[in-house]
Image (cartoon, rainbow, N blue to C red):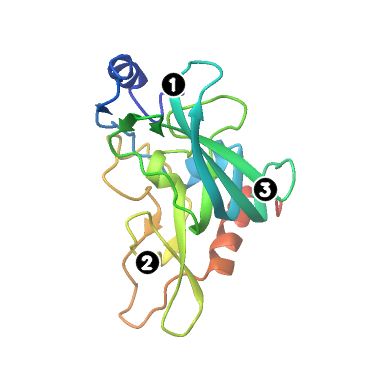
Amino acid sequence: MSDSRLIRGIALAVMALASVWSVPAAAASVALVGTSDLVGQSGLIFHGTVLSQWASRSTESGDIITRVLFRVHDTLKGRTPGDTVELEFLGGSLNGETLSVSDLAVPPIGEEGIFFVEQLDHPQVNPLYGWWQGEFLVRHDASGRKVVHTHELEPVYDFAPRTALERRGLSVGAAEGVVTSPAVPSAPALSLDDFKSRVRGMLGNGR
């Protein structure tokens, strides 16, 4: 895994102790990233909804993983093999054995959002870039508009180009450049379409 998202060695050391009991891995230490990092470094960015999830064994490591199948509504960057895409998250429960990773929340069935995926061809503890920083949830506001929220369900009011170079450290929430406070009290949260436009604008080529 890249140095951007987790001290993987600690988690893997704890995983070796997994048995029929729940074994929590060490809490994640996640580096703060910026919105420009999210857009520029993610190999795949898509708008989708979780269709299903199931636990299995990794064919590479033998660890318990949770596979999550998404319906892809729109691809903002990269390519998917079709109208669905499958992501793997470390941990889960299988045949009486549970492997848990602190601070890792697997998107539940029915969850709709914008997902920033670091890469598809290399398994990681969490495939989302910057962990929770790479997941934006879609909800309806009081008027019925689809608006974007952070992983912690804070409404997003702007998604401005930023890097984390000026504020190095660990993340405690949203990526640098994600604005969760309105400029004026009556300002609406960012709509799903406007959020996508911000991302595509940062890509610079419309896709």
Q: Secondary structure at mark 2?
A: loop
Q: Choose top left, top right, bottom left or bottom right for residue 150.
A: bottom left
Mark 2 is on which residue type?
Answer: Pro
Chain-order first, disc 1 or disc 2: 1
Mark 1 is on which residue type?
Answer: Asp
Label 1 crowd bin: few (<14), some (14–19), many (20+), radius 10 Å: some
Q: Choose top left, top right, bottom left or bottom right for residue 154.
A: bottom left
Q: Nearer the viewer, residue 207 or 12?
A: 12
Q: Residue at x 44, y 21 (%)?
A: 63
Disc number lying in front (3 or 1): 1
Pointers 1 and 2 in contact (C-beta within 8 Å) = no
Marking on residue 63: 1
Q: Secondary structure at mark 3?
A: strand
Marking on residue 84: 3
Chain-order first, disc 3 or disc 2: 3
Q: Nearer the viewer, residue 12 or 114?
A: 12
The percent position of residue 132, horizontal first and vertical second, equals 38, 45
Tell me how far mark 3 sits from mark 2, CA to CA: 27 Å
